[in-house]
Image (tube, grey):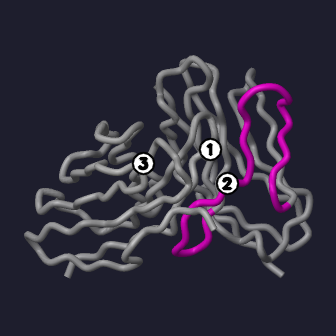
Amino acid sequence: AQSVTQLGSHVSVSEGALVLLRCNYSSSVPPYLFWYVQYPNQGLQLLLKYTTGATLVKGINGFEAEFKKSETSFHLTKPSAHMSDAAEYFCAVSGGAGGTSYGKLTFGQGTILTVHP
Amino acid sequence: DGGITQSPKYLFRKEGQNVTLSCEQNLNHDAMYWYRQDPGQGLRLIYYSQIVNDFQKGDIAEGYSVSREKKESFPLTVTSAQKNPTAFYLCASRQSNQPQHFGDGTRLSIL
């Protein structure tokens, strides 16, 4: 069984400030972890993913996330927020290699990021 | 360009009516998925299909049905048994160990 908890349904930052969106997961098998972004009335776009190997993963638009197994966390960060980053962000987990989840994703509840000028 | 096309973008259903949401992909992906999105609840899996002519229930399949007669198509029917169908519906597809790709969604409302 897998689950994802995103801490904070709304996060507000100033333009140029650090963005930190928190994600904790639980998984009975080594997980694959993902961050997706969604703009209003659109589908989800993949920001980055962790499967195996390096625990710090870099994604599009300057975002990165670090897989910390001991903390069961996969927080998303960006050093300097831009107005165009305002959107809803979803953390998701699936069973990794050897798992039987057939690629099914379990999503967190989402975090809406607001960026102030 | 390759991608996933969902249609229509907006759909209205009358009480007691079945409606079908279309999802077509030209990515040659084997697996396809349907999710329902409600505010503050993230995405929840309705049905998924790993190969043609085979599909499995997800976490919230009651009141929904699907078919997978062609690799590129995975339509979702919202039946009259689904008592709270108002939501944003997202279709996704995936190949091997790659991440899921999503369509732009269909917003279903009740008249």
Mark identifier at residue A46: 2
Tell if the residue under mark 1 belongs to the same chain as the one under mark 2.
Answer: no
Give the labeled residue for mark 1. Answer: B99
Q: CA distance from mark 1 to mark 2?
A: 8 Å
Residue A66 painted magenta:
no
Crowd tier of the residue under label 1, counting other residues whose Cα lies within 10 Å: few below 14, some 14–19, many 20 or above: some
* Residue B56: quarter of image: top left
Earlier in the chain: of badge 3 and badge 1, it is 3
Disc 1 vs disc 2: which is toward the camera?
A: 1
Q: Do callouts 3 and 1 mark residues in contact (Cβ within 8 Å)?
A: no
Q: Nearer the viewer, residue B85 or B91?
A: B91
Residue A60 colored magenta?
A: yes
x and y, in percent, of residue A54 in the image: 86, 29
The residue type indicated by label 2 comes to Leu
Residue type, label 3 = Tyr
Label 3 residue SS: strand
Residue that carries the numbered disc 3 in the rendered image = B33
What whole-number distance in Å separates the C-alpha atoms at marks 2 and 3?
16 Å
Residue in the foreground of this view, choosing between A6 and B95: B95
How many labels were placed on the picture? 3
Q: Tell me, for residue A54, which label it has, or none.
A: none
| Callout 2–callout 3 Cβ contact below 8 Å | no
Range of residues picked out in magenta: A38-61
Q: Amino acid at mark 1?
A: Pro
Query: Which residue is at 67% across, 54% downward?
Result: A46
Quadrant location, the C terminus of chain A: bottom right
Q: To which chain does the residue with label 1 belong?
A: B
Residue at the spot 58% in from the left edge and 19% down from the top edge: A29
Q: Evaluate if marks 1 and 2 touch, with contact meaning CB atoms under 8 Å apart.
A: yes
